[in-house]
Image (cartoon, rainbow, N blue to C red):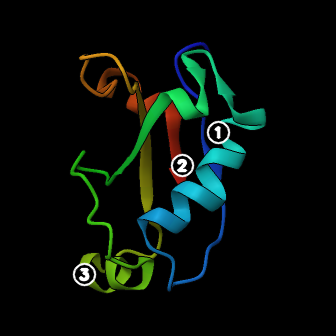
Amino acid sequence: TMSGGGIRKVRVQKTFCKSDIIVDLAKELILPNGRSSKGMIDELSINLFDFQKNDLPDDLSVGELYAKTGLNSLRFYLATKQSSALSSFKTSSLKNSESYL
């Protein structure tokens, strides 16, 4: 979509943490060729949020999230902002850039 990458449904190892998801999946699936409508990937700050729009801790694994939430499917939201800009994360378009894991 124009304001987001759309929904992606993927499977990951339960040992994956936020950095694994961002590096291995989000950048490849949501930001192909290292580019988005907001700019090149190295010009962006990338963050991952849970379904309540809470920032995910860096060291919390997918397996721990399953145990904590009791859900059988997890939904994460990828948000980007320009590194040099003072603007806040683009949470208004989170629904359009959601990813299922």
Q: Residue at x 71, y 48 (%)?
A: 28
Q: From the image, which quarter does the N terminus lie in?
A: top right
First in sequence: mark 3 vs mark 1: 1
Q: Residue at x 64, y 39 (%)?
A: 30
Residues at circles 1 and 2 in contact by the CB criterion of under 8 Å: yes
Percent from the top left, x then y, of residue 63? 42, 85
Q: Real-space Cα distance between discs 3 and 2?
A: 19 Å
Q: CA distance from mark 3 to mark 1?
A: 27 Å
Where's residue 26, x and y in %?
Answer: 59, 49
The kind of residue tagged 3 is Lys
Q: Is residue 101 visible?
A: no
Q: Earlier in the sequence, mark 1 or mark 2?
A: 1
> What kind of element bears circle 3?
helix
**Callout 1 secondary element:** loop
**Relative to 48, is 39 on the left or the right?**
right
Q: Foreground: 66 or 34?
A: 34
Whether 75 is drawn above or below 42: the answer is: below
Read off the residue under disc 3: 68
Q: Give the amino acid type for the residue marked by disc 2 in the picture.
A: Ser
Report which residue position mark 2 lands on.
Answer: 99
Q: Is residue 57 positioned above or below 16 on the image?
A: above
